[in-house]
Amino acid sequence: MKVKDTYILKKVADKHIVVPTKEATLNLNGIITLNETGKFLFECLESETTIEELTQKMISNYKIDYEIAKKDILAFVEVLRSKNMLDEA
């Protein structure tokens, strides 16, 4: 899975935001603001990856427990899915 290329991550002032482009503007009204962890996961999802790969990257980057990392990632991915922001094979 990966984030559709019609969504881009930008830094505005001190905020990380996801902005829809092209036809994605029809599906998402507005922008999504991300915290540092969300930014990290979004950047990881800019290329093809799996939940397990995301979990390992998050554990490595944040030194957190596997179960906590996976739970947080699944919640984040579910938000992206609900907004039709992912390309999934």
Image (cartoon, rainbow, N blue to C red):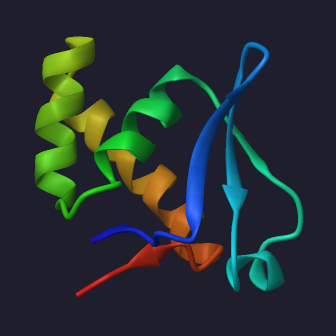
Circle count: 0
Residue drawn at 65 percent across, 74 percent down: 83
Image coords of residue 53 (percent x, y): 11, 48
- Res. 84 image quadrant: bottom right
Q: Residue at x 16, y 33 (%)?
A: 57
Asked if residue 52 is positioned above or below residue 11 in the image, the reply reads: below
Q: Report whether 69 appears left or right of 74.
A: left
The image position of residue 6, as x and y in percent, is 57, 71
Q: Residue at x 51, y 35 (%)?
A: 38
Q: Is residue 35 left or right of residue 17?
A: left
Residue 74 place in picture, x, y as percent:
38, 55
The x and y percentages for residue 2 are: 33, 66
Q: State whether residue 25 appears in this view.
A: yes
- Residue 7 versus residue 39 in the image, above or below: below
* Of 10 and 56, the residue lying toward us: 10
Q: Quadrant of the C terminus?
A: bottom left
> At x 48% / y 53%, what residue is drawn?
75
Task: Decide which of 39, 79 is in the foreground and name it.
Answer: 39
Q: Quadrant of the N terminus?
A: bottom left
Which image quadrant is residue 82 in? bottom right
In the visual, does 87 lie left or right of 67? right
Residue 64 in sight here: no
| Residue closest to the far right | 29
Nearest the viewer among 71 and 57 is 57
